[in-house]
Image: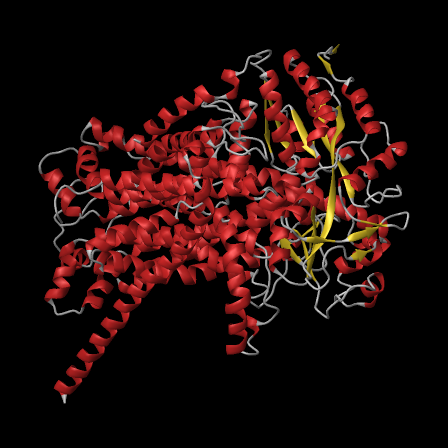
Amino acid sequence: MKLKHKKRNLRKRKITNVIMLSFSFFAAIVTIIPLALIFYYTISKGIANLNIDFFTKMPTPVGEPGGGMANAIVGTILLILIGGAIGIPLGILSGLYISEFGNNRFGDVVRFLTDVLSGVPSIVVGVVAYTLIVIPMGHFSAFAGGGALAILMIPTITRTTESMINLVPSSYREAGLALGIPKWKTTLAIVLKTAWKGIATGILLGLARAAGETAPLLFTALGNRFWSVNVFQPIASLTVYIYQYATAPFKDWNDQAWTAALVLILMISVLSLFFRFITRSKYKV
Amino acid sequence: MIACNSNKQGDSSEDQLPGAMSESNGSSNVKINGAGSTFDYPIFSKWFDNYYKTTGVQINYASIGSGGGIQQITSGTVDFGATDAPMTEEQMNAFKDKQETEVLHIPIIIGGVAVTYNLPSAGQGLKLDGPTLADIFMGKIKKWNDARIASLNPDKTLPAKPILVAHRSDGSGTTFIFTDYLSKVSGAWANSIGSSTSVKWPVGLGGKGSEGVAGLISQTEGAIGYVELSYAIHNKLSYAELKNEKGNFIEANFKTVTQSAASAVGNMPEDLRVMITNAEGENAYPISAFSWVVVPKDIKGQKKAEALVKFLKWAVTDGQDDAESLYYAPLPEEVQRLDLVKIDLITSNGNNINVQ
Amino acid sequence: MSNNPTGSLTTDTSFESVKSLINGKVKRKKEPSPFTKKILGHKNIGDLIFERLTLLFAALVVLLVVVMGWEMYVHSRLSIKEFGFQFLVSTEWDPYAEHFGALPMIFGTIVSSILALLIAVPLGIGVAVFLSELSPLWLERPLSFLTELLAGIPSIIYGLWGIFVLVPWLRDDVEPFLQKAFPGVPLFEGTPYGFGMLAAAIILSIMILPIISSISRDVLRSVPQAQREAAYGLGATKWEVTRIVLGNAKSGLLGATMLGLGRAIGETMAVTMVIGNRPEISASLLDPAYTMASVVANEFTEATSMLYLSALIELALVLFIITIIVNVLARLLVWSTEEKRG
């Protein structure tokens, strides 16, 4: 009788196995479907205007054909660079703090507040950046826009850094310490390097999200119809243009909005590929 | 890296910039920033591009909404604002406190609000009047074949479908104009709901932006809503003919909208802040309104002030030629004259500005 | 041996610590606050600089959040004084008469976010499991890449796709089907417009899927291979091994979920384009609703009076506080399950 029970148990475990694994495969498929649909939709609407002009020319007034969004493309890149320059160090270093030294009340506070920060609506972040940067400066600027984007990136980067570093087995740290390497070097050279791939994902997700935001830029970078790479002046961005053009009653503007969306997705793809490249493992796992 | 690639293309585009190639370079170091009404954005973009090509002055504009424009001009982060709803006393006082000068309202263009609907069997040009419209939006008239709608439209087939009201979910000048009209034609509306950029709608779904409302209507049979005339035309939506003060059923177009302003000129107050809904002209379209540029009376920078004054004078006269192609209604002559007088009041550090 | 955060090794080889090591959980003693630690606690200057530097940056983040909360509080004082507690329980949002009650929006935010999580967390972790445990390499790379790409799509594009693709599909196919299949159930009552809570929940879940799945995937990958091998050695099926891996990665998975939740609560653009924007509470998924973030985004730039503006900022403050409460609850949940395991 014991054997029968064991056999039944084994059958049950095998069935559960198949069910759960099928579910995860199913999950993957279900995730791909809306992704594919949105891509298809964006591509079909945006491909028409995707030509070299789009990357090199300035926007033309309504009704005049041609023109592009050179200023917005460069603007978005500049904004992400500024946002990343502020947000990535803040995110990684605070994540490092929490995971290595944060086993105390203050660390808990940081962890907690980072999660809270991730829930703040992007428009509120924009308004806060407006109060903290634009008002003292007296005018809108790319710097303010980058600042707002940095605030949006920080929670993702911090949390991911902390998670990834926590998952590095303690044996790695102990090995380093046993060799006489000081803690800070162990952390940077061994632990951080091990966790790097996951942290890079966090950074990528943060940058991608920031690149796709509109609301915070409206009150900080404002927008600019002209060419500008001046950090202390208003600057154009793809998302603000998408927002203004997609909701305007002019077909050529609507079309350009979709093309801008397509370009934005292409830019994220390039960024993603870049991250994958720099975090590729030199050894086959 | 990516940045390098784009910078390369960026550099080459600098060679192609109109500014670099144009002959005129006048006050090319002057940069002016404005913000406000999304309604004005299309024509502003055309004006600013043309102006830049001819004078080299860069005027930049962000369409963050009328209220946003007012907030920014009050805090001094932009040089001018644009709004579909005139500033309230409270806002004008706040401006005066902060900027230590008065704010001027300059009507810059006129727009019409179309009552759009999705009812294939009725076709274009459903006839409605003020009180009926108000009752529809209050939820008192629930079906398309209601007696009151039918009596206005004896020649149309109206199905027994329920009416779905679509309104703006975001605060907007368009809502302000529409509710201002409804308040004028319906006492019940004025008492219970009132007029503002955002109101408590008794029934209906909210769409974000005129595009959202237009999308809602085009997706839902039996829907009715209000959008800027340009959106109705662009999205090929049917829109209603409204009965005006004089009793005529008027279709919204540039002429009838301009008519509203022309017929209201006689009663315009000194500061040009007036709502021209339900105007008295024979062929006036009842839901029309100005859009204003708001500027400080005294502008600190001399060069900036000159450039702005010159631009405004051009915009209210020659610039009006661009109106119709972009679905706006141009300012009538009388209003243009009043505008020029108002613009002449602008000073810089107390000095008058002399530009052509 | 167990890991002591200051880097020095202890020789605690008790059964408890070995067991916890195997389980992947490490017992840590609570440390004194960094501000009271003496400088001489460190063995070399590099460590000191490192700790102080990271502390500085962490403190900056804390400062940022505190400043945000403070700014919001200051600007909502006017509204708090005017409406008091009523703000949280009144269902009337009337900008013209200047009566502001946030209850329908609180309801909308919480319900839409929870629904989005209910959809996205199982799917997201399912995808993560697939990518890290099951999928062959040639499939995993492009699939991961595509999921990450989803994160970069501007929310307004989601909104537009929602209006023109999702909403008609819901209105014409899904919602009538649900009404036929479950007649009389209050969850599916009302006229199918397509716009409404269901559309918002679906769009939100699509938006937070990439965050949850990408981070979970990396978290799962980081669990040491030894864990899996040990379990296989004991005769576990693949799913049972995965379960153990998931257990190890629990806090990382929770972190991913919290980030996803954060995004869902604060998302504005895409939601407001499909939710119908009607400040009403309803049991039906098919009815329109309104979220706090949407209200702020919609009405902020057009707020005509100081009180109106203040009410909107108070709404943002309420959202902030709700995020705090949700985070506290999540932490309590995790601590209580860890206690049980103990």
Q: Percent position (x, y) of residue C313?
A: 60, 43
Q: Quarter-wise, where is residue B153 in the image?
A: bottom right
Q: Percent position (x, y) of residue A11?
A: 19, 79
For residue A69, above or below residue C331: above
Judged left or right of residue A169, residue B218 is right
Q: Residue at x 24, y 57 (%)?
A: C248
- Is residue B122 visible in the rendered structure shown here? yes
Q: Nearer the viewer, residue C73 or B325?
A: B325
Spot the residue most to the left. Answer: A179
For residue A92, above or below residue C151: above
Q: Nearer the viewer, residue C284 or C141?
A: C141
Judged left or right of residue A192, residue B41 is right
For residue A263, above or below residue B99: below
Q: Quarter-wise, where is residue A149 in the image?
A: top left
Q: Nearer the viewer, residue B329 or A238?
A: B329
For residue C323, above or below residue B345: below
Q: Residue at x 83, y 67 (%)?
A: B147
Q: Nearer the viewer, residue A162 or A32?
A: A32
Judged left or right of residue A220, residue B180 is right
